[in-house]
Image (cartoon, rainbow, N blue to C red):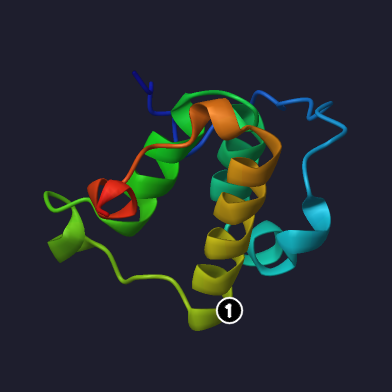
Amino acid sequence: MIVKTPQKTNVIIKLENSDFPTHLTKHLKLKFNRVFRNLHLFWGTSDFHEYIHTLVMNPKDNLNRQGFPFEVIKELHKIHIEHDNKFPSFKKVDKWDILP
């Protein structure tokens, strides 16, 4: 289960995850720093996929969200693929992937 982090905080999160692919998240870091920090926080955990999913497809919040620019969507997709490659045990099985 994912615990939502507060949007504004005076606490500085120390990002020590050295294998996090910061080179894939240039626009996220600049334009959506809170999202960048959360991706870094969930990197290498089973909660990563759920967090990505809530960013892209969360029906209850869709009316209140502006959406991400295209370059950020591309980064989210790339980092999602990178996570699947590095941590295949956390990859969610898609029903369409197992069809003959």
Quarter location, residue 31: bottom right
Q: Residue at x 61, y 66 (%)?
A: 75
Residue displayed at 77% across by 40% down:
20
* x and y percentages locating residue 65 in the rendered image: 27, 63
Q: Furthest-front residue in view?
A: 100
Of 11 and 99, the residue lying toward us: 99
Between 7 and 17, the one nearer to me in the picture: 17
Q: Which residue is nearer to you in this view: 50 or 91?
A: 91
For disc 1, the neighbor class at 10 Å (few under 14, some 14 to 19, many from 20) is few
Residue 18, percent from left and from top: 88, 32
> Residue at the spot x=70%, y=64% of the render?
30
Residue on which the image places disc 1: 71
Give the amino acid at mark 1.
Glu
Quadrant where the N terminus sits is top left
Depicted 3 relative to depicted 94: above or below: above
Does residue 8 sit above or below 1 in this rendering? below
Left or right of residue 26, residue 36 in this image: left
**In the rendered image, which quarter contains the C terminus?**
bottom left
Extreme right residue here? Answer: 18
